[in-house]
Amino acid sequence: MAWLVNAAYAQASATPVTLNFVDADIDVVAKAVGELTGKTFVLDPRVKGKVNIQSAKGISPGLAYPTFLSALRMAGFAAVEGPGGVVRVVPEVDAKALPTPLTGGSSGAVITKVIPLLHQSAGQVINALRPLVAAANALTVYPPGNAIIITDYSDNIAKIQAVIARLDTPSVAAPELIPLNHANALDVVSTLNRVFADPTVSADSRDRLLITADLRSNSVIIRSEDSGRLSRVRTLVQELDRATAAPGNIRMVYLKHADATQIAQTLRRVLGAESGASASASSPLASLLPTSAPQATGATPLAAVTAALSGSTAQPSSGSLPQAAANNSTAFTAGGATVYADSSINALVISAPTPVYNNLRTVIEQLDVRRAQVFVEALIVEVQADRAAEFGIQWQGLDGLNRSGTQGFGGTNFGSATSSPTNNILGVANNPTAVGQGLSFGLLRGAITIAGKQYLNLGLLARALQSDVSANILSMPTLLALDNEEARFSGGQTVPVLTGQYANASSNNSVTPFATFDRKEVGLILRVKPMITEGGSIRLQLYQEVSSVAPSTISGVDAVGLSTFNKRVLETSVLADDGQIVVLGGLLQEGFTNDQEKIPVLGDVPGLGQLFRYDTRKRTKTNLMIFLRPTVLRDASQAGILSNERYRVLGLDQQAVSPESRFMMPEMTNPGLPMGAPVDVRK
């Protein structure tokens, strides 16, 4: 019986049908198509509207379902096929959230496809596919599998698969290795970069040409997406890889960053040459070497002439840079190679067979690199707070000194009339105008004469003084030092220090008195030697000294050359990260002094004892801290940013102190730095 039903359905499915739906509801059309195809349609409540389907002649019932799906797609709805012939019709924006099939599906149904790529990057290919997919459908990249996941209509996915098949092809930009037999890879690469350098080349990857050298195999590596450019570079490399036609085997190597003399000394140690060996007369470089040996001294010609006349060897001063000799060169022969360093042009002249030269050139290229610099900022902060107070009363009774007969005198006398005459009652009586600072109150009773000298009869002297002294000293020396090179900064003054003197004992001595002085640098000294480790941290060997001249307690001629110095020295080695602020050391000092002079018994009487007592109190507090912040400058851009910022800040500070205009005063310009970024002289 079943075979009769199937046969009848097959005969009915082969019968052409005519579809004519004008402004028909979607649910009505779905019911009719379901009867023709045997599928079950489940419509979302939001699926409402009308469709128009017209056929001029009869079509196969199998085409009715794709035709209905096309009509739904035009109305903004999508069909998602499920198991058992169930088709769910939902709005197009919600179709990607339903469990769509991963493979198969009728034309016009929404499915999900995972398309892996073999050659190209999925992240780059997806940019070309986005315009081909509606915004409501999903198009994502799975980076670990280098695959593209897309949810779209099955016929559109078939088109996208065809596009991906055209794009996912092996790239012509695969690196190509060209070994050299005669030429050096570095020389060939330098020539190729100059020949093919084109400043007008766009940022398109197809227009880029990358050329580099492999020193180990003496080969040239080229890479480009333009096969024509690759062919031209390959031909030029073959033309350059020929034995030199010039006699001999002498090559010139110009250095970019390193010093030629130091590189030559390194090569001499690598080749095992003796420290005093020089190029022989039979060497190919014999004609290039100077006829006379260079002088090893670093003195100037004037110093050499002075030393020849005086018979002594002149040494350069410690505060000046070493002067270059007339021909500061280094030459040696070892290992089948002759190397001559010419410091005037910072170049190496090498005579060696090609294999030896290639090995030496590899070492030179690794040594001739730009060394990093370290910008060191040292911060010295010193905060001082001093507070002092004194109060006392002194009495003096001298009225009876000028009378005849037996008389008495007395009084209180605190301090010294010679060392501190401004605070002592006898010193003030001798010179009232030299009374000390603060509030002073006294009582006079005329004047008296003692030993032919007249003094004021000062019967009472009361003094009161309170002082508060605070200081905030901030010093910030900075240094820019090359990696593993010592730098020094010094700022201050030179102070004379008395070392000896001679004075005549009597007026009859004919020897002229004299005094000898020495000079001492006072101020701030910073010496630092940075070393950048492989991990990026900075090891600093640092010496810092801060000195000053203390106020002298002696005045007059006797104080000339007798100076007292305050000195603080810090010497350490620290390890810091790039840009990290570290504390190097500090001094926290606090002192209290309580000085009391009084009359026994009377000075201890409560209340009235202050009339017979002199009190002096002083409290000092010093807080000194030293900080450090190193910053690594690895290229010219970092150094330029730092320098331009400091340049700008200094210019603004100079503008801030420019004089204001005044009536009857001529206009005067304030000298200062030109504002703006420093001019690049390389342009």
Image (cartoon, rainbow, N blue to C red):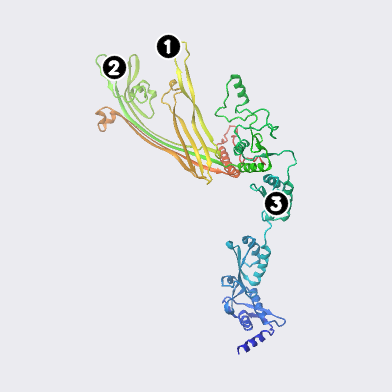
User: How far apart are the two marked residues, 3 and 2, measured between alpha carbons?
Assistant: 110 Å
Sequence-earlier tag: 3 or 2: 3
Q: Which residue is mark 3?
A: 201
Q: Which residue is mark 1?
A: 506
User: Which of the two marks, 1 or 2, is nearer to us in this view?
Assistant: 1
**Location of residue 449 with respect to 129 vertically, above or below:** above
| Crowd band around label 2 with a 10 angstrom C-alpha radius: few (<14), some (14–19), many (20+) | some
Sequence-earlier tag: 1 or 2: 2
Residue drawn 67% across the image and 82% down it = 61
Q: Quadrant of residue 227?
A: bottom right
**Location of residue 194 with respect to 469 vertically, above or below:** below
Q: What amino acid is at disc 1?
A: Ser
**Location of residue 214 with respect to 678 vertically, above or below:** below
Q: What amino acid is at disc 2?
A: Leu
Task: Give the structural element (helix, strand or loop) at label 2.
Answer: helix
Task: Give the structural element (helix, strand or loop) at label 3.
Answer: loop
Q: Residue 84, image x and y in percent? A: 58, 79
Q: Which residue occupies the foreground of this view, 22 or 604?
A: 22
Residue drawn 35% across the image and 15% down it = 453
Task: Give the structural element (helix, strand or loop) at label 1.
Answer: loop
**Disc marking residue 207:** none
Describe residue 403's horizontal placement relative to residue 674 as left or right: left
Q: Which residue occupies the foreground of this view, 566 or 558?
A: 566
The answer to whether any part of residue 190 appears in the image is yes
User: Which of the two marks, 3 or 2, is nearer to us in this view?
Assistant: 3
Q: Residue 288, image x and y in percent? A: 69, 33
Q: What amino acid is at disc 3?
A: Val
| Crowd band around label 3 with a 10 angstrom C-alpha radius: few (<14), some (14–19), many (20+) | few
| Crowd band around label 1 with a 10 angstrom C-alpha radius: few (<14), some (14–19), many (20+) | few
Can you name the residue that lies furthest to the top here? 508
Q: Which residue is mark 2?
A: 401
The answer to whether any part of residue 656 appears in the image is no
